[in-house]
Image: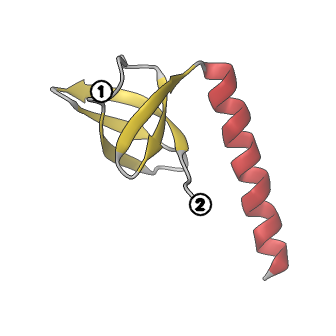
Amino acid sequence: MCLAIPGKILEITDNIAKVDFGYGATRDVDVTLVDAEEGQYVLVHVGYAIQVLDQEEAEETLNLWREILELEEYDL
């Protein structure tokens, strides 16, 4: 199974973007595969942005991830 996580681009230098995944988690992501700009949301898989998302779609996906992680806490 492959997972991709949405994040917001904070800045881009050359083809590397600093992406905010929330809760203080930022990572460098290669944006070579997409036409993305600072302030946009991207879907990230293994260090590469694979799709640009609109804000509504990104927030919906992030909310679903939060729900999944909350359920995992209770199953432990």
Which three-letter amino acid code belongs to the residue tagged 2? Answer: Met
Q: Nearer the viewer, residue 16 or 51?
A: 51
* Residue 70 relative to residue 37: left or right: right
Classify the position of the C terminus by image quarter. bottom right
Classify the position of the N terminus by image quarter. bottom right
Q: Quadrant of residue 56?
A: top right
Q: Nearer the viewer, residue 53 or 8?
A: 53
Q: Which residue is denoted by mark 2 in the rendering?
A: 1
Image location of residue 46, percent across then percent down:
39, 52
| Front disc: 2 or 1 | 2
Name the disc covering residue 52, or none: none
* Residue 66 relative to residue 28: left or right: right
Looking at the image, tell me whether mark 2 or mark 1 is earlier in sequence order.
Answer: 2
Please tell me whether residue 64 is drawn above or below residue 52 in the rendered image: below
* Rendered residue at 45%/42% (across/down): 44
Which three-letter amino acid code belongs to the residue tagged 1? Answer: Glu
Image location of residue 29, percent across then percent down:
31, 41
Q: Which residue is denoted by mark 1 in the rendering?
A: 11
The CA distance from mark 2 to mark 1 is 30 Å
Q: Nearer the viewer, residue 29 or 45?
A: 45
Mark 2: secondary structure: loop
Image location of residue 2, percent across then percent down:
55, 55
Please tell me whether residue 4 is drawn above or below residue 59 in the rendered image: below
* Residue 26 relative to residue 59: left or right: left
* Rendered residue at 59%/18% (across/down): 54
